[in-house]
Amino acid sequence: MTKIERDDIQIISQHSNWSEKSIDKILKQQIYSTKESWQKFLKLFFISLGISFTTAGIIFFFAYNWADLHKFIKIGVIECLVVMTTLIVLFSKTSLTIKNALLTGASILVGVLFAVFGQIYQTGANAYDFFLGWTLFITLWVVISNFVPLWLVYIILINTTLVFYFQQVAYCPEIYLYTLFSVINLIFLISCLLVKKNFKGIRPPIWFTNLIALASVTLGTIGIVRGIFEHRKILTHGDYLTPIMLEIVAFTAIIYGIGIMYGLKVKSGFYLALISFSVIVSISTFIISYIDFNTIFDNASLFLALSLFVIVSVTITIITLNNLQRKWKN
Amino acid sequence: MEKLNNKKALLDRIHLSEGVDFEYNEKEILKEYQKQNENTSSLSIKILSILGGFFAALAFLGFLIIIRLNDEHIIIALGIGFIISAILLSKVYNKLSIDTFSVSFYIIGVSLFFAGFSGLHIANNTTVPLLILIALIALLITQNYILSFISVLVISGSSLGLIISNDRSDLIHLYITITTIVLTYFFLNEAKIISSSKKLCKLYNPIRIGLVISLLFGLISIGENSIMSIAQNRIWISSIVMIFLNLYLVYLIMKRIEIEALKDKILIYALTSLVLIPLLFAPFILGVIVLILISFLVNYKTGLVIGILSIVYFISRYYYDLDFTLLTKSILLFVSGIIFLLLYILTNKKLNTHEKI
């Protein structure tokens, strides 16, 4: 027996004399949130608000940097809080989700601990080793809890650590950074998908993998867009073409190729749409980069070309996606 | 084919429970399913066609500026032409593949229409109501998802524009009140609306998402001081409406989760008021709470996700802008955190005992 969905109700209602009362009844019975889902929702709602507000309160308290408070008390208080939360997680009988939420709070407190340490001993708040320490020390919790929001915090932390590392230690040219981080997040995505495929028990939710894919492609696109503008600047200054741009484009093209192949294989319209849009943006940027803003009035045809390109390419993408999705469905 | 058979079974089931009075046009219904099957729109496709349409329109408007098109009458005529072709395109074809074109034409048309009237020095107070009228006519003629969604945004955006251009920032409270009440009515009377007419039924989904975004527009305007200067001492006007709506929603939720004892009800109302009243000067947070509760009530996931993302944003903004020392803020946050944790423990206890009974 197939479950009735909103679409079904709407379509049937349009071509029948289905009464308001019966529709209302079926909506309430089959579509709207049930008593059980409300209970789950309310619990989650309150616990996440509770933990986030309390943690935020603690962060603000230490950000206030109370001069009269002795450093041992400062560090001691946070350490006690971390230990207490962890003990609750270990020994209480609450549900797994709640424990994981508490552990996420504790992971943030570890960051506060490092920050206060940095505050007292003047090691700086944006030093990469501060984030490195934070990342390393919560790794075990992240792996054990395997809680999606905590994984999200973890990935953001790794990204932050690496950004500071490449800026402060490795002195990586900025133009490479975006492409580099696109690749780093792509590695996360691939590991996530591999785990999903090989370990039957672990199922990272689709919004999580899509979010990482979105981050990776966005960074890749920014890399190309910036690359195109820098490259144009060099050209107008009479220099010759830099190989950087070619490297970036080649790299991104390979990644996108793999992405499209994967999207076709797992029948994900999201990956295909995302990559196509990134390509459209990149090509549009290339057209825009030819517009000389000093003699803008001679560039009308470029604007027209851009407009036509966007509308036609988006339409072709949509038609292709639609055909694919139809094929996948049947 | 199997899917269509499932749908037939579904129809039979409804027929059975509805009795002999239930009449339906099976051929039309199956045709509709066929059409839906041919145009499998997903969220990414919708976003793609809106973004694509928007950028193409922008580039085309740039082109028109560069070729120095400055005869207002031609601009207005062109604008009307674009609007009509957008509506006709979506009315005649109503296909996914044509959406980007109609979106683009619609945006170009509306912009040209507005630019032309401004060029003729006609006051915004005449032009903007005309735009609203155009959007309403569009809604009446075509029930295409994306075009209807944009029409709703044109209506709400124009209303906001009218408030800003007349410098009557107090009217934002009226805007927010109307949007929230319409949204609540729309969400809670789903059965009534979709059974009332075929057109309204088709418009239900696009108007619903349009209303959510329109409400966000209003809440952002009242939350961000840079958009319009709102008298801070009268900011509670919107809050009053929101608090009552929230309490009404709590009443509906209690009915849903079958809380009947008077003692429990009073306790819940008291606690809800305790959470809501301190937010009297933050109507934007109250508004998002309405959105979250009502979206969850009718199980509308997009609304819920938008609500949760915006509440994170609005709460952070609120505490960031508060004019207190970090220490006071920290105490405020900590105390609210503890209250929420207590609420959690309370719901846990209450709901579990109810389960046992």
Image: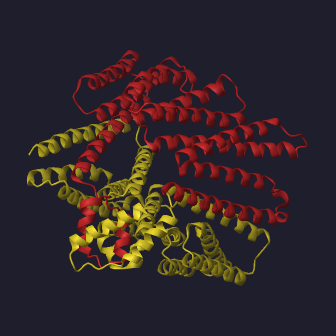
Chain colours: A red, B yellow
Residue at left offset 71%, top offset 43%: A224
Q: Position of residue B244 (x, y in %)?
A: 26, 62
Q: Residue A127's x, y, as percent?
A: 57, 24
Relative to B211, does residue A261 appear above or below in the rendering?
A: above
Q: Is residue B225 visible?
A: no
Instruction: Depth check: give the residue in front, A328 or B305.
Output: A328
Looking at the rendered structure, the number of numbered marks drawn on it comes to 0
Quadrant location, the N terminus of chain A: bottom left
On the question of residue A157 being in view, the answer is yes
In the rendered structure, the answer to whether residue B262 lies left or right of residue A133 reads left
Q: What percent of the width, then of the height, locates residue B291?
A: 36, 58
Residue closer to the observer: A319 or B331: A319
Q: Outermost residue, top direction? A: A72
**In this rendering, is residue B86 above or below B259?**
below
A123 in relation to A19, above or below: above
Residue B338 as seen in the image, left or right of residue B68: left
